[in-house]
Image: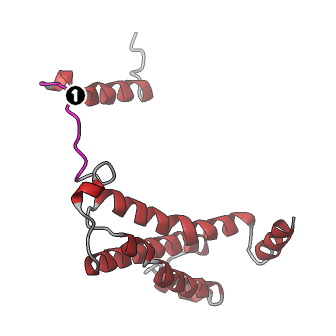
């Protein structure tokens, strides 16, 4: 109950509940997405790189929040003089993601990489992909999945 009361006071300063939820998304989810995708696709990513992006990302996020104090500053964050206030959270999430990925890459390159044997099953480049046994295009499951997907979503109109 105390947490909900404190949350109500936090939301009180937002324009709407949707603005508050989008601000939380740009603060937590966007950088986490960058770290997870980078960790799944790049075998050089390290634990230190994944956790090292927290402090710089939070400070950048705080500076982007200064747009609320000066709405004219949004054009610098969005890199466009035509940016609208609705786009503030989108650009905040974009910059959080970019800073997260950059810091993760830089810190990962400065630390010792994990052995490839520990990454098997976790990282795309080191995980062996099983062979499905298909030889030609018509034997590949992905071909029939695309065909099925196309005709289920966009069926041909009846011509007769």
Farthest left residue?
Answer: 135
- Residue numbers of the magenta segment: 126-135
- Residue 13 appears at what percent x and percent y? 77, 78
- Residue 84 appears at what percent x and percent y? 57, 74
Relative placement, left or right, of 75 versus 40 is right
**Residue at 60%, 75% in the rendered image:** 85
Quadrant (top left, top right, bottom left, bottom right) of the N terminus: bottom right
Q: Does the magenta stretch include residue 134?
A: yes
Q: Is residue 61 above or below residue 118?
A: below
> What residue is shown with label 1?
132
Please name whichever residue, 42 or 139, is drawn nearer the observer in this view of the structure. 42
Snapshot quadrant of residue 110: bottom left
Q: Is residue 92 magenta?
A: no
Secondary structure under the numbered disc 1 in the rendered image: loop
**Residue at 62%, 90% in the rendered image:** 70
Q: How many labels does the image show?
A: 1
What secondary structure characterizes most of the magenta part?
Answer: loop
Q: Can residue 142 be seen in this view?
A: yes
- Residue 66 appears at what percent x and percent y? 60, 88
**Residue at 33%, 79% in the rendered image:** 107
**Residue at 42%, 61% in the rendered image:** 36
Snapshot quadrant of residue 25: bottom right
Please name whichever residue, 106 or 122, is drawn nearer the observer in this view of the structure. 122
Q: Is residue 19 above or below residue 110?
A: above
Relative placement, left or right, of 23 versus 79 is right
Q: Is residue 81 visible?
A: no
């Amino acid at each position: 109950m105390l947490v909900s009361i404190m949350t109500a006071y936090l939301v009180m300063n937002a324009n709407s509940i949707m603005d508050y939820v989008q601000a939380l998304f740009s603060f937590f989810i966007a950088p986490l997405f960058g770290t997870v995708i980078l960790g799944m696709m790049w075998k050089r990513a390290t634990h230190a790189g994944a956790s090292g992006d927290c402090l710089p990302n939070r400070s950048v996020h705080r500076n982007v929040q200064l747009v609320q104090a000066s709405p004219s500053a949004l054009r610098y964050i969005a890199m466009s003089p035509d940016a609208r206030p609705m786009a503030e959270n989108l650009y905040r999430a974009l910059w959080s993601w970019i800073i997260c990925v950059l810091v993760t890459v830089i810190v990962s390159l400065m630390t010792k990489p994990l052995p490839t044997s520990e990454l098997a099953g976790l990282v795309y480049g080191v995980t062996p992909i099983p062979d499905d046994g298909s030889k030609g295009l018509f034997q590949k499951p992905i071909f029939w999945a695309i065909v099925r997907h196309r005709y289920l979503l966009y069926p041909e109109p009846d011509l007769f």
